Image (tube, rainbow, N blue to C red):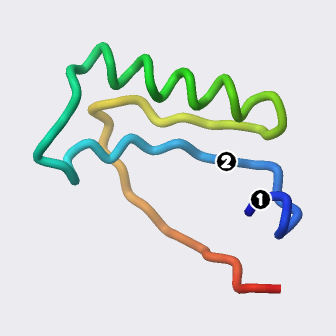
Amino acid sequence: MCKEVQNNTIVLLPFAHLSNNLAPYAQGIQIISSIEEILKTEFTVYRAHFGSHKELLLDVYGHP
């Protein structure tokens, strides 16, 4: 989708509180780190850490 809208920045936000079936903390960190490493090959990636307060303002691109 980033390529389609010509954007190269991705922000990874771990919203773990949205699930009642969580993986262990260490496994969650490993998963999000793996996702980050894969995405870094093509995009600029920012990641919020687990346990941080998050406030989200979302701008969503429409279809071209």
Number of the front mark, 1 or 2: 1
Residue located 43% across and 17% down the image:
30
The mark that comes first in sequence, 1 or 2, is: 1
Frontmost residue, 47 versus 53: 47
Residue 33, percent across and down?
52, 22
Residue 35 in the figure: left or right of residue 38: left
Residue 14, percent across and down?
38, 41
Frontmost residue, 11 versus 30: 30
Q: Secondary structure at mark 2?
A: strand
Q: Which residue is mark 2?
A: 10
- When asked about the image quadrant of residue 34, the answer is top right
Tell me, for residue 14, which label it has, or none: none
Residue located 32% across and 47% down the image:
15
For this orientation, the residue located farthest to the top is: 26
Residue 4 in the figure: left or right of residue 13: right
- When asked about the image quadrant of residue 13, the answer is top left
Residue located 62% across and 76% down the image:
60
Q: Which residue is mark 1?
A: 2
Contact, CB < 8 Å: mark 1 with mark 2?
A: yes
Residue 30 lies, with reference to residue 4, above or below; the image says above
- Which amino acid type is marked by label 2? Ile
Residue 25, percent across and down?
25, 20
